[in-house]
Image: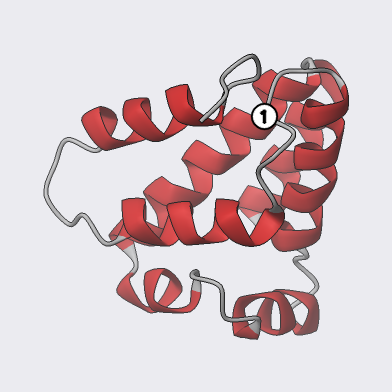
């Protein structure tokens, strides 16, 4: 799966925060263009199970990158994985282009050093 390979490559070569936000953005873009993925992306664990069965544990990769980015101080420590999934779902539900305004707002809100 292209996204899996992309996630692994980003994680190898980039800082934790950069890698997390790159995968977050790639998943949102993919989900926005594929309604089925967007519908499964919220807090529902079906996306995790589907990805694991397909051998594409993108959710696990996202969780690992989230933890690393939080440890590095690049992502707020008070945001959990399910919060990230809900934000992804909200971004994916925006069917109109461009996605940049909503992605920018969400990414700015997730950045470390921000206290809600």
| In this view, 15 is above or below 105 | above
> Which quadrant: the N terminus?
bottom right
What residue lies at 35% left-to-right and 25% top-to-bottom? Answer: 104
Q: Secondary structure at mark 1?
A: loop
Quick check: 95 left or right of 36?
A: left
In the rendered image, residue 41, in percent from the top left (x then y), is placed at: 50, 69
The residue that appears at 70% across and 51% down in the rendered structure is 80
- Badge 1 density bin: few <14, some 14–19, many ≥20, Cα 10 Å: many
| Residue 66: x %, y % from top left | 75, 40
- Between 10 and 44, the residue placed more toward the observer is 44
The number of numbered discs placed on residues in the rendered structure image is: 1
Q: Is residue 6 left or right of residue 93?
A: right
Nearer to us in this view, 103 or 81: 81
Q: Residue at x 70, y 75 (%)?
A: 48
Give the percent coordinates (x, y) of residue 73: 78, 18
- Residue extending farthest to the front is 116
On the image, numbered disc 1 is attached to which residue?
A: 76
Snapshot quadrant of residue 69:
top right
Q: Position of residue 49 (x, y in %)?
A: 73, 84
Q: Nearer the viewer, residue 49 or 88?
A: 88
Q: Indicate how the structure is coloured in the image.
A: secondary structure
Name the quadrant containing residue 110: top right
Viewer-proximal residue among 116 and 100: 116
Q: Residue at x 31, y 73 (%)?
A: 35
Up-down: is 30 above or below 113?
A: below
From this view, report whether residue 109 is shown above or below residue 46. above
């Amino acid at each position: 799966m292209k996204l899996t390979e992309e996630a692994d490559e980003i994680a190898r070569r980039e800082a934790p925060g950069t890698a997390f936000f790159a995968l977050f953005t790639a998943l949102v873009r993919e989900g926005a263009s594929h309604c089925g993925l967007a519908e499964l992306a919220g807090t529902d664990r079906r996306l995790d199970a589907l990805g694991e069965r397909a051998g594409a544990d993108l959710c696990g990769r996202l969780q690992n990158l989230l933890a690393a980015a939080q440890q590095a101080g690049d992502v707020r420590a008070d945001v959990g994985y399910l919060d990230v999934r809900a934000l992804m779902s909200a971004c994916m539900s925006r069917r109109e282009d461009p996605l940049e305004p909503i992605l920018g707002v969400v990414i700015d809100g997730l950045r470390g050093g921000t206290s809600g």
